[in-house]
């Protein structure tokens, strides 16, 4: 065992020495004046001539500049060496989350969230994750795909604590809870009032609430209404999911939503420090454009970009919790929603112009 440790120690030292040598040589090469203003055309043998041995041969054969070599060194992480940081990235239409090491950019794990994954068994087995995936069904229909956006870490006193990860499904209006003890999805929650979302699943500073903002306006509760009735029947929303940290679960029966105008709430997050207790959502399409270029209307993108300013939604979360607890809500699909008029009258919702 001691011999093995000694060998590993020498091996790591040798690797480190090689990396340092390559960095120094590359920097020296980059400082040399070869009479040109940049890398030589058609190759960079002159710029990498100072690289010795196999390193120089590889650089010359591949036409690598000193900057290329430096870029490779900045991301190179030897096998068995941990990355300094871990990034959680949304998988988009794959419906999953990628765990990526930094600076190596290696994919450490693909976390199955909204889509079955045969290779890791997610979504299979009556006693296993099939039940988790089924939590995301809607009106008796199976949903086996998603569009993940904007993962967010749990927080303690406003700092990331690495205990939980939350992510939304923009396509189907769902929220996922991932436990970072084992990097597995533990819960899916379908928003009962909204078809889709985009405002992420950002946590309040002590992760007692998870904030889910909508995006595209729609009739609350999935009811149908013609697009011609957009201003009258379509609405935005923001949902506050109560989170039980000890259980690691969202408590749906202690959660609520606020009705918002049919402007498109884009990204939301909770304030910290001096702004603790407030939630902020930006928005666009205060024009309430609905497209219809074939009918002579402005193209949708142009129609939604006419105003110089849209609105930052500023929400008093603490007051909203009190109002919801007092029962000043309406029932939409069995879910308590604070009506827009009540939100205004109770001082929950404010607008500030934003470009």
Image (cartoon, rainbow, N blue to C red):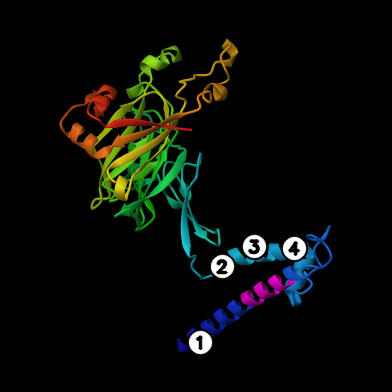
Q: Which residue is mark 4?
A: 64
| CA gap, disc 2 and disc 1 | 21 Å
Q: Is residue 44 left or right of residue 147?
A: right
Q: Which residue is mark 1?
A: 6
Q: Which residue is mark 3?
A: 71
Stretch in magenta? 19-29
| CA gap, disc 2 and disc 4 | 20 Å
> First in sequence: mark 1 or mark 3?
1
Q: Secondary structure at mark 2?
A: loop
Indicate whether 48 appears above or below 102: below
Q: Nearer the viewer, residue 221 or 297?
A: 297
Q: Are marks 4 and 3 in contact (CB under 8 Å)?
A: no
> First in sequence: mark 2 or mark 1?
1
Q: How many marks?
A: 4
> First in sequence: mark 1 or mark 4?
1
- Estimate the x, y position of residue 209 in percent, counting from the top left: 28, 43
Which of the 4 image quadrants contains residue 335?
top left
Q: Nearer the viewer, residue 5 or 17?
A: 17
The label shown at residue 332 is none
The 10 Å Cα crowd at callout 2, few under 14, some 14 to 19, many 20 or more, is some
- Estimate the x, y position of residue 126 in percent, counting from the top left: 33, 44
Q: Are marks 2 and 4 in contact (CB under 8 Å)?
A: no
Indicate whether 330 appears above or below 202: above
Residue at 34 percent of width and 56 percent of height: 159
> First in sequence: mark 2 or mark 4?
4
Which of the 4 image quadrants contains residue 197?
top left
2 or 4: mark nearer the eye: 4
Q: Is residue 190 magenta?
A: no
Indicate whether 191 appears above or below 117: above
């Amino acid at each position: 065992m001691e011999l093995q440790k000694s060998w590993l120690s020498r091996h790591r030292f040798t690797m480190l020495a090689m990396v340092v040598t390559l960095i120094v040589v590359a920097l020296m090469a980059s400082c040399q004046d070869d009479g040109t203003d940049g890398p030589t055309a058609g190759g960079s043998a002159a710029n990498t001539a100072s690289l010795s041995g196999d390193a120089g041969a590889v650089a010359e054969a591949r036409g690598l500049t000193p900057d290329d070599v430096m870029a490779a060194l900045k991301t190179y992480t030897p096998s068995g060496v941990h990355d300094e940081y871990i990034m959680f990235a949304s998988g988009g239409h794959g419906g999953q989350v990628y765990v990526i090491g930094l600076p190596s950019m290696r994919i450490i794990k693909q976390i199955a969230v909204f889509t079955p994954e045969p290779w890791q068994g997610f979504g299979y087995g009556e006693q296993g994750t099939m039940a988790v995936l089924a939590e995301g069904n809607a009106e008796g229909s199976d949903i086996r795909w998603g569009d993940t956006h904007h993962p967010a870490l749990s927080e303690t006193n406003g700092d990331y604590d690495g205990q939980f990860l939350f992510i939304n499904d923009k396509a189907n209006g769902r929220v996922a809870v991932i436990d970072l003890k084992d990097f597995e999805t533990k819960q899916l929650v379908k928003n009962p009032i909204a078809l889709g979302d985009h405002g992420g699943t950002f946590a309040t500073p002590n992760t007692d609430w998870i904030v889910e903002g909508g995006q595209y306006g729609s009739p609350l509760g999935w009811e149908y209404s013609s697009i011609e009735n957009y201003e009258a029947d379509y609405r935005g929303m923001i949902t506050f999911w109560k989170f039980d940290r000890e259980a690691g679960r969202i408590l749906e029966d202690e959660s609520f939503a606020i009705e918002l105008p049919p402007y498109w709430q884009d990204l939301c997050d909770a304030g910290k420090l001096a702004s603790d207790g407030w939630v902020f959502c930006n928005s666009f399409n205060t024009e309430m454009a609905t497209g219809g270029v074939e009918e002579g209307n402005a193209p949708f993108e142009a129609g939604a970009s006419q105003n110089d300013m849209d609105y930052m939604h500023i929400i008093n979360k603490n007051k909203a919790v009190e109002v919801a607890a007092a029962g000043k809500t309406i029932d939409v699909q069995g879910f308590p929603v604070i009506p827009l008029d009540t939100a205004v009258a109770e001082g929950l919702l404010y607008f500030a112009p934003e470009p």
